[in-house]
Amino acid sequence: MDTLSVTMVSAFTSGAISMGLVWLTSRQQWRDSKRAQRETQNISYLNPLRWHTAEAHHRLSLYANSVARYGFYQPAQVLNEPQEVDGKSPAWFAGTGVALVSSIWMTSCLFAQMTRARHDIPFLRLPGKDDTRLSALILKVHVAFAACDVYYATQSSIGTDVILEPEGRLRSYREFCDLLSQPDRRVWADPLIWFHLAIANGERRPNLQRALDALQELSGFLDDSLAGGASLRARWDAEL
């Protein structure tokens, strides 16, 4: 092979290799970009659900632990029925009623995030059949609360009421208290108030445990999906 032929073959080979490297690099960058986009989407959709799942589990665990030890959860024993919320002052919501009402608020925020997650599942990019698994675990939480007479349609209504449009943010505790102060709006939350009053009095223990188990299972799935730590343990550690 003459010198010119060798030079041409060498140039062609070098060019092919360069083009291949450029293609491979571009392909890897595209994959990295898609992966980063997928992770950002998952975090933006699932992180709020993960946080509120841990918060709701933590608060209901306070009820369960106190009931197991004393037979009741005294801080939340401040009402006999939901209608007694009517006419309560801001000072009551910020003081005497805060343990009960903030628990109801946290659970309502959980309902809001579960409602959002059900709508957002088509936009998520989860491995394998994890999107189906997520739907099943959310439904399991819904069913657990439905067994407490907080029926599915009521949960969705409460969750929707907590979401403020058009901002899309959730009501603050103070804004939630303002909502409960309106009898015609409060009535939709009455089943959830009844449930919290019942468990504060040591009733419905199997229902409470069922809800806690469902929340724990959902929390574990979200921890794995987001490659985060154990959020339930972290929530308890935050109190130490």
Image (cartoon, helix red, strand yellow):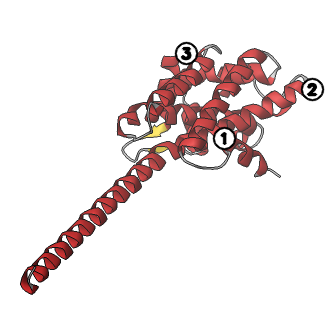
Answer above or below: position of 218 versus 201: below
User: In the rendered structure, which disc, 2 or 1, sits on the residue that comes first in sequence?
Assistant: 1
Of 153 and 2, nearer the camera is 2
In the figure, is residue 166 to the left or right of 21? right
Of 27 and 20, nearer the camera is 20
Q: What residue type is labelled 2?
A: Tyr
In the figure, is residue 223 to the left or right of 16? right
Q: Residue furthest front?
A: 1
Query: For mark 3, what is the residue?
Result: 151
The N terminus sits in image quarter = bottom left
Q: What residue type is labelled 3?
A: Tyr
Q: Residue 71 placed where, x, y %?
A: 89, 22
Who's the residue at 63% across and 13% down the image?
Answer: 147
Who's the residue at 17% across and 78% down the image?
Answer: 10
User: In the rendered structure, which disc, 3 or 1, sits on the residue that comes first in sequence?
Assistant: 1
Answer above or below: position of 212 versus 55: above
Q: Residue 55 carries which label?
A: 1
Q: Residues within 10 Å of mark 3 (few under 14, many from 20)?
A: some
